[in-house]
Amino acid sequence: MQADSTLSAASFRLTGRRVLLIFVGFFGTIASADAVLVASALRTWSGLEVASPYHAGRVYNAELARARAQEARGWHLESAVARVGTGATVGVSLQGRGAVPLAGKDLRARLERPTDARADRGLALAETAPGHYAGRVEALPGGQWRLVVEVLGADGVELRRERRLTID
């Protein structure tokens, strides 16, 4: 039995051609895997977070002033998201100082994907009771989302709140 194993080992010869084929096969596999991963990354990249980072930097002080004005109003906004079938409902409660419901406000909301702006969903919020607003979005996949609620006024956005959430 040992004669057969020595014979098969002796019949295999490592030649320069075989080493070249092993070398090319190994690095060809690595290069192919890299090409697939790079193509996938480029295809799924959604782009920049803001259209002009320079402009975003220039309006930074204005954003800080807007945030201070929002805090000075003393408004309180609470939100809840509930899964309904394949979609979801968004409920918002808006109160002023002293827990007084703020009725008749114009609210808009967006569900944003933190990793892909192409999947963002906007929804209209309608007042269901004084200070309570609700809206529905259809066919919402599960995962990480950012809920952005804005209260619009004559001067633009009077209040903006963001909340990170996971939808099952």
Image (tube, grey):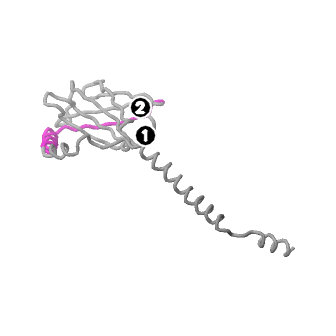
Residue 162 falls inside the magenta stretch: no
Quickly name the residue at label 1.
167
Q: Which mark is residue 43?
A: none
Residue 107: image x %, image y %? 25, 29
Dot 1 crowding, Cα within 10 Å, few <14, some 14–19, many 20+ = few
Helix, strand or loop at label 1? It is strand
Q: Nearer the viewer, residue 54 or 67?
A: 54
Check contact, mark 1 vs mark 2: CB within 8 A: yes
Helix, strand or loop at label 2? It is strand
Looking at the image, residue 37 lies above or below residue 130: below
The number of numbered badges drawn on the structure is 2
At horizontal 36% and vertical 32% (from top left) the residue drawn is: 121
Mark 1 to mark 2 CA distance (whole Å): 9 Å
Q: Amino acid at mark 2?
A: Ala
Q: Residue furthest right?
A: 1
Describe residue 123's horizontal placement relative to residue 8 as left or right.
left
Q: Amino acid at mark 1?
A: Ile
Q: Which mark is residue 88?
A: 2
Residues shaded magenta? 62-85
Residue 3: image x %, image y %? 85, 75
Query: In the picture, residue 159 is in which quadrant?
Result: top left
At horizontal 53% and vertical 57% (from top left) the residue drawn is: 30
